[in-house]
Image (cartoon, helix red, strand yellow):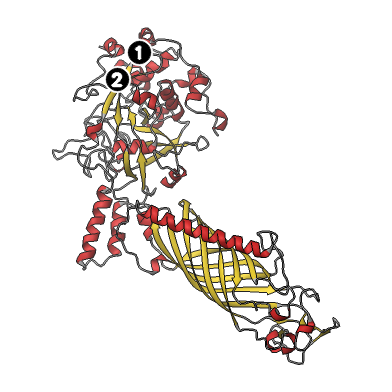
C-alpha cells in the first residue's frame, strides 16, 4: 500500500466510524431513559495527558508505508495536555470534547540524496543535511465512546490544531556534497540552524511559514484500573501545510506531510464526585446517596428543579420506568402447573412468572456502602419457580431415588419409578465439569449427596436442635433443607429436571417484578401495620423468636409475596446459579441483557440470596447480596428450583381456579398421603 492509498483508506475508515457511531447515538438515545439531572461543569471534566512515539514522513524523508500501521522507524516523540469534557448520551455511548496543547518532535538521519532534494533548485545551492523540528500549539477535538463493557470503551476521535513551526538543520550540503555551515550564528540551546534563516537552502520566493495547521484522526482504547482511567491511542496527523520539513520546493519526491503516533496516557478528574454517567447508568449508590447527589446538583429554590427532583425521586424509589407497575398487573398473569421430580411420581407446583424489565440492585439506605454493587436495568424472560424452598422431605426423596439408605428411607421406595441417573449424568445435566472446579470436592459417588452434619456446628445449634432430628425426623419434613452445598443443590435441580434460579430471576421474583421494592412486601420495615412480623429473621441482636420461630420455620410460613412465593426473605438464605462478582456490570457480558447470569465454575464463591433466621432486617432485603464458598455447606443456606425451558413451560397442564394451589401441601401427591 503506498502512502497516498494508505492515507485515503484511513480517512475513509474514520468517516465510516463516525457516521456509524452518530447513527448509533440517534438509535440508542430513543430507547434510553434520561432523568433530567445536572452536574457541575467541572465535575464532568478530566485533566488528560499522554506521551508517545511518532514517525514522520514528508518531502525530506518519505518512509512509505510506516511498516503498514505502526510508527516505524521511530524518529520522534509526542506529548499532549488537554482538558476533556465528558458528554453523556446513554449507558453504551458518550462523547468527549477536548481542548489543550499538543507537541510532536522529529529528527531525521543525516543524508545527501540527489533523488530527494536537489541543490540546484535552492537559491544558494544548499540543501539541509538533516531536519529537526518540534511543533507545538493548541488543538481542539472530539470523540465518541462506545462501551462494550462498563470499564472499557473504544473511541474514534478527530481533532484540529495550529502549531508553531521552525524546521532546523545541523549543517548543509553544497552541490559537491560537502558539509558547510552558513554564515549565521547557531541557536544557543539547540546548536543548529533555523532553515527559515538560511535563504540559500530554499527556492527563490519560497517562505517557510511560522505555523502549520493539521488534522489528527485515530482511535483510542480507554480502560479503568483501580478507579483511574488509562488509554492507548493510535492516531495519524496530516499537516495541511507542506512545510513541516522546510524543503518543499527543492524536493524531487514531494508527498504528503504526515505522522503516525502511538501514545499512552491517563485521565484525572478535575473535580471529584459522581458523574452523570454514574447516576444514569446505575453505577450505583443506595437511595439516599442518589437523592443527595441529585439534590446537590439542583437549585432547590427553583420550582422547575424541584419538580425534576421529585420526578427523579419517583424514578429511583419505585422504579417508575419499569413497565407494569400497577398493583397486581404482573401478579395477575401468574399461572401454576405441576412438575414431577426426577424418577418419582412426586410432583410439586411451579409458579409461571411473566417476564418484564426491572432494575436489579439494592435501593434502601446503605450508609456503610456494603452493598455497593450498582444498579442495572435488565430484561427477564418468562420463567417458572418453585413457590417454596426445597424441603427436608423432598431432599430425602432425592437421596432415596438415587439409591441411598438413611433412617426412614424404606418409606420412600414404593414411590420411586424407573432407574436413577448416574452421578456422571447428573454432573453433565448440571453442566459441572469437575476438571474446571478449582477446589477438591468429591462428587463421584451418591454418598456425596448427603447433607453435611459437620456444618451444623457452624452456629453451635446442635445442643438446641441436633441435625439428625431436624433432617431425618418427620416433624421437620416441611422445613427447608440446609447443610447442602452449592454443588449438591445443583445436582438436586438437575435430577428434578429443573435448575437453580439465577440471581436476576431470584431478585425479580422476590420483588414481584418491581425494582424499587426493598423487601418482598411493600414498605421499609419487617412488620405490617398491626405489628405482625412478615418474615423469620433476627429482630434484635440475640433476639430471634418475636416472629414466632426461634430457628427454622416451615417453608410456607408467613404470607407469600405478590408472585405467590413464600419466604423470599429470611428463614434460610438460598443458593442461586451465579458465581460472585463485586459488581452487577459483569452481567453485561451478555450483550442481549435478557436474564443474564454469571455462571463461572472457576469462581468458588457462589451467591446466596434472601437472608436467614439469623440475619438482621437489612440483610433480608431483596436487593442484598451475600456469598459463600460453594463447596462448603451451611445451616443457614437452602435453595429452591426454577426453569425457563420451553419444553417445561409449554408442555404442562395448567392448574385451574383462582385459589393458589400452593396453599397447603400438594394434597394429590402420594408421598403426602403417606405422611398423612
Q: Is residue 408 above or below residue 526?
A: above
Q: Is residue 565 left or right of residue 13?
A: left
Q: Is residue 586 above or below residue 116?
A: above
Q: Is residue 237 above or below residue 624?
A: below
The residue at which mark 1 appears reads as 345
Of circles 2 and 1, which is in front? 2
From the top left corner, tell me how far across and down residue 4 is, in percent: 65, 65
| Camera-nearest residue between 654 and 459 | 654
Q: Is residue 296 left or right of residue 60?
A: left
Work out which quarter of the rendered image holds the C terminus and state it: top left
Q: How far, Cα to Cα, is label 2 from label 1?
A: 16 Å
Quadrant of residue 345 within the rendered picture: top left
From the top left corner, tell me how far across and down residue 450 is, in percent: 44, 20
Does dot 2 land on a helix, a strand or a loop? loop
User: Which mark, residue 653?
Assistant: 2
Q: Residue at x 29, y 10 (%)?
A: 674
Quadrant of residue 5 within the rendered picture: bottom right
| Camera-nearest residue between 436 and 630 | 436
Q: Is residue 657 left or right of residue 368?
A: left
Quadrant of residue 518 within the rendered picture: top left
From the top left corner, tell me how far across and down residue 260 is, in percent: 64, 65
Work out which quarter of the rendered image holds the N terminus and state it: bottom right
Q: Residue at x 28, y 39 (%)?
A: 511
Q: Is residue 616 above or below residue 225?
A: above
From the top left corner, tell me how far across and down residue 241 is, in percent: 61, 77
Q: Is residue 55 left or right of residue 44?
A: right
Amino acid at each position: 500500500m503506498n502512502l497516498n492509498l494508505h492515507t485515503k483508506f484511513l480517512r475513509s475508515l474514520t468517516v465510516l466510524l463516525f457516521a456509524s457511531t452518530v447513527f448509533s447515538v440517534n438509535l440508542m438515545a430513543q430507547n434510553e431513559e434520561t432523568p433530567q439531572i445536572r452536574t457541575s461543569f467541572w465535575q464532568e471534566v478530566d485533566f488528560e495527558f499522554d506521551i508517545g512515539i511518532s514517525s514522520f514522513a514528508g518531502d525530506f524523508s518519505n518512509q512509505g508505508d510506516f511498516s503498514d500501521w505502526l510508527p516505524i522507524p521511530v524518529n520522534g516523540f509526542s506529548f499532549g495536555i488537554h482538558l476533556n469534557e465528558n458528554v453523556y448520551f446513554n449507558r453504551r455511548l458518550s462523547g468527549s470534547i477536548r481542548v489543550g496543547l499538543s507537541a510532536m518532535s522529529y529528527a531525521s538521519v543525516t543524508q545527501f540524496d540527489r533523488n530527494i532534494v536537489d541543490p540546484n533548485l535552492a537559491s544558494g545551492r544548499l540543501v539541509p543535511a538533516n531536519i529537526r523540528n518540534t511543533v507545538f500549539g493548541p488543538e481542539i477535538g472530539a470523540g465518541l465512546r462506545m462501551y462494550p463493557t462498563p470499564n472499557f470503551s473504544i473511541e474514534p476521535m478527530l481533532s484540529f490544531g495550529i502549531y508553531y513551526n521552525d524546521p532546523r538543520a545541523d549543517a548543509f550540503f553544497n552541490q559537491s556534497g560537502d558539509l558547510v555551515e552558513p554564515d549565521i550564528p547557531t541557536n544557543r540551546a539547540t546548536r543548529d540552524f533555523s532553515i527559515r534563516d538560511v535563504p540559500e537552502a530554499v527556492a527563490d520566493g519560497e517562505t517557510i511559514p511560522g505555523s502549520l495547521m493539521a488534522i489528527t484522526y485515530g482511535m483510542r482504547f480507554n480502560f479503568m484500573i483501580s478507579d483511574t482511567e488509562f488509554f492507548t491511542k493510535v492516531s495519524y496527523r496530516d499537516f495541511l501545510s507542506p512545510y513541516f520539513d522546510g524543503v518543499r520546493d527543492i524536493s524531487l519526491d514531494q508527498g504528503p506531510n504526515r505522522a503516525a503516533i502511538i501514545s499512552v496516557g491517563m485521565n484525572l478528574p478535575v473535580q471529584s464526585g459522581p458523574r452523570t454517567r454514574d447516576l444514569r447508568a446505575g453505577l450505583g449508590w443506595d437511595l439516599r446517596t442518589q437523592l443527595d447527589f441529585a439534590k446537590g446538583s439542583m437549585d432547590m429554590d427553583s420550582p422547575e428543579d424541584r419538580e425534576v427532583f421529585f420526578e427523579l425521586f419517583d424514578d429511583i424509589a419505585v422504579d417508575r420506568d419499569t413497565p407494569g407497575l400497577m398493583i397486581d398487573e404482573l401478579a395477575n398473569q401468574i399461572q401454576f402447573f405441576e412438575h414431577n421430580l426426577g424418577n418419582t411420581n412426586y410432583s410439586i407446583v411451579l409458579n409461571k412468572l411473566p417476564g418484564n424489565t426491572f432494575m436489579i440492585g439494592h435501593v434502601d439506605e446503605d450508609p456503610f456502602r456494603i452493598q455497593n454493587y450498582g444498579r442495572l436495568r435488565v430484561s427477564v424472560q418468562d420463567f417458572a419457580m418453585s413457590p417454596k424452598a426445597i424441603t427436608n422431605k423432598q431432599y430425602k426423596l432425592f437421596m432415596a431415588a438415587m439409591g441411598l439408605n438413611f433412617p426412614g428411607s424404606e418409606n420412600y421406595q414404593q414411590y420411586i419409578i424407573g432407574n436413577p441417573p448416574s452421578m456422571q449424568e447428573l454432573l453433565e445435566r448440571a453442566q459441572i465439569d469437575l476438571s474446571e472446579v478449582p477446589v477438591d470436592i468429591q462428587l463421584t459417588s451418591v454418598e456425596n449427596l448427603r447433607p453435611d452434619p459437620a456444618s451444623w456446628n457452624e452456629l453451635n445449634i446442635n445442643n438446641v436442635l441436633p441435625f439428625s432430628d431436624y433432617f431425618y425426623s418427620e416433624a421437620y419434613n416441611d422445613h427447608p433443607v440446609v447443610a447442602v452445598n452449592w454443588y449438591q443443590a445443583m445436582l438436586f435441580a438437575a435430577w428434578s429436571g429443573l435448575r437453580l434460579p439465577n440471581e436476576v430471576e431470584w431478585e425479580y421474583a422476590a420483588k414481584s417484578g418491581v425494582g424499587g421494592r426493598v423487601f418482598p412486601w411493600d414498605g421499609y420495615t419487617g412488620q405490617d401495620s398491626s405489628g405482625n412480623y412478615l418474615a423469620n429473621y433476627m429482630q434484635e441482636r440475640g433476639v430471634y423468636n418475636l416472629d414466632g420461630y426461634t430457628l427454622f420455620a416451615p417453608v410456607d410460613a408467613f404470607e407469600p409475596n405478590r408472585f405467590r412465593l413464600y419466604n423470599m426473605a429470611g428463614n434460610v438464605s438460598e443458593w442461586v446459579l451465579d458465581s460472585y462478582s463485586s459488581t452487577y456490570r459483569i452481567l453485561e457480558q451478555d450483550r442481549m441483557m435478557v436474564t443474564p447470569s454469571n455462571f463461572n465454575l472457576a469462581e468458588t464463591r457462589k451467591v446466596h440470596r434472601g437472608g436467614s433466621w439469623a440475619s438482621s432486617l437489612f440483610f433480608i432485603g431483596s436487593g442484598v447480596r451475600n456469598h459463600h464458598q460453594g463447596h462448603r455447606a451451611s445451616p443457614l443456606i437452602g435453595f429452591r428450583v426454577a426453569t425457563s425451558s420451553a419444553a417445561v413451560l409449554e408442555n404442562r397442564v395448567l392448574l385451574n381456579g383462582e385459589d393458589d394451589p400452593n396453599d397447603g401441601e400438594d394434597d394429590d401427591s402420594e408421598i403426602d398421603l403417606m405422611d398423612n
